[in-house]
Amino acid sequence: MSIPSVETSASPESGGPVPLRRQRDYRLLWSARAVSETGSEVARLALPLTAATVLAASPIEMGLLTAASTVPFLLVGLPSGALADRVIRRRPVMATCEVAAGLAVLSVPAAWLGGLLSIPWLIAVALTVGVCTVLFRSFNLPHLTSVVAPSQRTAALAGFQSVFAIAQMCGPSLGGLLVALLTAPVAVVVNAVTFLASALCLSGIRAPEHRTRSRRRGMLREIGEGMSALVRHGTLRALCATGMIVNLLGAAQLALFVLFAVRVLGLPGALVGVAATGFGVGGLLGAVLASRLARRFGENRVLLGSVLFFPVGFVATAAAGGPVWLVVCQLGAAEVVTGVAIVCYSVCASSVTMREAPAELLGRVNATIGFATQGVMAPGSMLGGLLGASIGLRPTLWVCSIAALLVIPCLWLSPIRRGARPAAAGSTSAAPLPRSAPAAARR
């Protein structure tokens, strides 16, 4: 299967690539993610607040509502990758997912005004949005190959990460303001509008998607081919294993972080949020640095360097103590460092996945990585809770800190180290031949 070159990727004056900021299709794709991610951060606060304040949800109901947004990764994560490799045009599917998610979210204020809103209704909405999110992400990475030239994909991925970082920093504050002004159910309308705006941006992209339809061999067999390609490829296998370790431990730490910060460190609730915003700041800085570091050192070297900083956040959290101002500084600084490392890693891991995975299997390989790295988060949260209850909060965080050291040999003993050579001048990819998701642990 051949991927067509991007019509706007070459400069007529120099023959080189046009900067991404001047490429209309990339600007539309970036804008779609910007509005959608910002709206999602608003809904991340508004939906639980609707359940808690309007419907007086119980702790079990809140747990079910939270789980409903991540269960789709386990239910449709693998089939979505096979579907992404089957279809000729991925963009219409992505736009349809955004419209479906927008309509589902829009039903919340409508049901509230009609007196029909209930916890099962919110759970159904969360499930619908979760399924649309999984499908969108499975189609998004393969779709990027038809919009952005190979030499610019690392920079394009870094641009998306800047969107995520800004949304993480501003979304919760915007969500809180909207909830205060409009009430929680009405604030959800913002999320619905952003989904629909994202679909509109996607529909305006003109890059052709001329692909040869692959011969269908049955869903299970196609899923197996994606899994087999991942398991047999040393580089992709190492990226997936690293993502699984980080997400498992990140979920375990996240399950205890608020309790630890409030009960052990004595932080007021407002300062817990201030410390947590450090990750968004670091993520934005990492998005700026990622493509520059990749151009200078190559993606493989950036990956190897990034994992050296992964344990920093775990260790700093476990060791935090002292006056409130010092604790906030410790946690905030650790979050910044972790944010830079995670985003640099995530950008380069996605670029390497696009480079190394067979083109006809990219959707399935990416979906398999997402299934594995996202699927460990639920058991990771449970593990953190069980350890916290049995050995205590701080000892559990130290266990996570020690276990986080495993990511270093996981990557440094893989083929990634043998291929860690500087990138060629003017290129952000090594020789041509889904995305690893440590960042998802914090999303």
Image (spheres, rainbow, N blue to C red):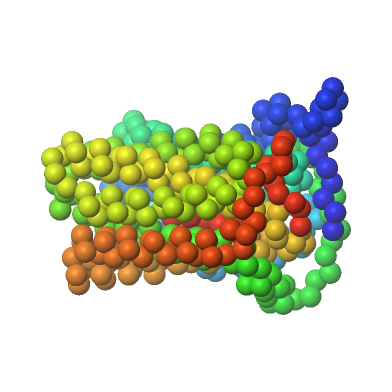
Q: Quadrant of the N terminus?
A: bottom right
Counting from the top left corner in percent of width and height, residue 75 is at: 54, 69
Which residue is painted at 79% across and 75% down in the image? 217
Counting from the top left corner in percent of width and height, residue 383 is at: 32, 69
Quarter residue 323 falls in: top left
Q: Is residue 266 left or right of residue 54?
A: left
78 and 4: which is toward the camera: 4
297 and 322: which is toward the camera: 297
Task: Mark yes or no: residue 105 visible.
Answer: no
Counting from the top left corner in percent of width and height, residue 344 is at: 52, 45
Task: Mark yes or no: residue 226 visible.
Answer: yes
301 and 22: which is toward the camera: 301
Q: Looking at the picture, does residue 184 appear above or below residue 421?
A: above
Looking at the image, which residue sits at the far top?
Answer: 13
Image mark count: 0
Which residue is painted at 61% across and 48% down in the image? 299
Counting from the top left corner in percent of width and height, residue 135 is at: 62, 57
Quarter residue 389 falls in: bottom left
Which residue is painted at 14% across and 44% down in the image? 322
Which residue is painted at 74% across and 44% down in the image? 150
